Image (spheres, rainbow, N blue to C red):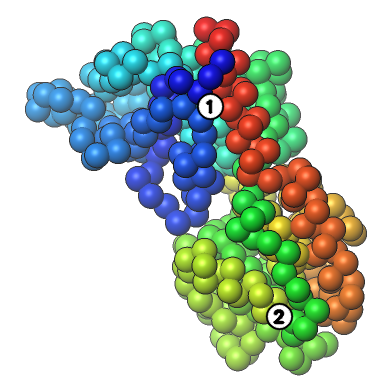
Amino acid sequence: MSAEYNLCIIKPNKSAFSETFIQAHIDRLAGHKKVLYGGAFPVYDSEDKTLIKSKLGLLSYLIQKKIFRRKNIRVRTNALKNYLLNNKIDIVFAEYGMVGASVTDACKLAKVPLIIHFHGADVYHRETVASYAALYQSAFKYASAFIAVSADMAETLKQMGAPADKIYNASCGVDTNAFPLLDISASKNNFLFVGRFVEKKSPLSLVRAFKIVTEKLNDARLWMVGAGPLFDATKSLIHELGLEDKITLTGVQKPAEIRKLMKQMRAFVQHSVKAKNGDKEGTPLTVLEASSSGLPVVSTRHSGIKEAVIENKTGFLTDEYDINGMAQKMISLAESPQLAIKMGEEGHEHMVNNYDINLRIELLDSIIKKSIGNN
């Protein structure tokens, strides 16, 4: 089958700095693409026009959503069904489980196949999964394919009721050309974290681990890139531990600035954990980008990280909340530049062979074509 098909990608947010993996799908997947967004259910097209055309329909939708908090709203479902039919959409590719579950009925009505790409919280966050339980079951019956981003997630989807023969393990890919192998031979004892300051990335655990590192290595430095609900708590802990001159909080940075920072680093560090609400990582793109760049990774035995980082070969992994264990692994890399270089080179090769964005897009394109062909 040629790529002469109409693909509708549906995403929750118009834009989000941490969702570059969705933009990669929009930019790279084959087919003639239309993009919709607007929360768990798409309300707007790429020109910011509402799918619900009448004022009365919009009013009805807003009342049902805001006041009655309904998830299944007929006027909204019909608007999407009409959009899919009017634009001759051959297949819908939904980013996140909540989105896929919410649009299942519209796809059914339009007789359009559906692929749902899960990412993390949509599988692990207990409250989210519970609130969409009925819609998930309907989606599991209808959708043609489900994309998981780790072996752990694929197993969880099976336990939730998704048909095993429709589940594909395909984490987000990394552009290995944009993140080429760096020469870290002259790097100082600099460490980098990039990500949202949220519980599942446990920035406070990382700061505590780094405090131990500085007690052994006075010249060690840590850059923490990103923002989020735990940013202020992280800043306070840094002050409490007297680390203001050793840890730099940069805020959100553009990809080009992050790549510039990577050139100065010895290793990438991230202390991912299971949050109290059940939320977990999928496979963090920042880990893939760091590994592609030739930075060894120090992280935890958590979700897709266990696949992305080959333990003791491309980096070191510790148990969740093993603060001292993480510190000791960071010290090992600080004290042995040659070990860091070797692990970084192995990591780059692992990314090129197994996580390159082109490999991922080829797989997703094949799943899309198969789903259209089976419809």
Of residues 303 and 131, the one nearer the viewer is 303
Give the side of residue 113 with respect to residue 365, left or right: left
Quadrant (top left/top right/bottom left/bottom right) for the N terminus: top right
Relative height, residue 171 to residue 160 (above, below): below
Q: Secondary structure at mark 2?
A: strand
> Residue 266 placed where, x, y %?
75, 75
Give the side of residue 317 with respect to residue 282, left or right: right
Q: Is residue 332 visible?
A: no
Tell which residue pokes out farthest to the left in this image.
Answer: 55
Mark 1 burial class by Cα count in 10 Å: few <14, some 14-19, many 20+: many
> Residue 48 placed where, x, y %?
23, 40
Relative height, residue 144 to residue 202 (above, below): above
Query: Which residue lies at the image location 27% right of the left edge and 16% below the top edge?
Result: 86
Q: Is residue 5 visible?
A: yes
Give the side of residue 76 with respect to residue 192, left or right: left
> Residue 20 placed where, x, y %?
50, 50
> Residue 250 placed where, x, y %?
51, 76
Q: Which of the 4 image quadrants contains residue 367?
A: top right
Please give the residue where the numbered disc 2 appears in the rendered image. 190
Relative height, residue 190 to residue 148 (above, below): below
Q: Secondary structure at mark 1?
A: strand
Of residues 57 and 52, the one nearer the viewer is 52
- Marks 1 & 2, CB-CB < 8 Å contact: no
Q: Mark 1 to mark 2: distance in Å?
A: 39 Å
Query: Which residue lies at the image location 80% right of the left edge and 79% below the top edge?
Result: 185
Query: Which residue lies at the image location 52% right of the left edge and 71% below the top edge?
Result: 257
Q: Which of the 4 image quadrants contains residue 144?
A: top right
User: In the image, what residue type sits under mark 2?
Assistant: Asn
User: In the image, what residue type sits under mark 1?
Assistant: Ile
Query: Which residue lies at the image location 40% right of the left edge and 39% below the top edge?
Result: 12
Please give the residue where the numbered disc 1 appears in the rendered image. 116
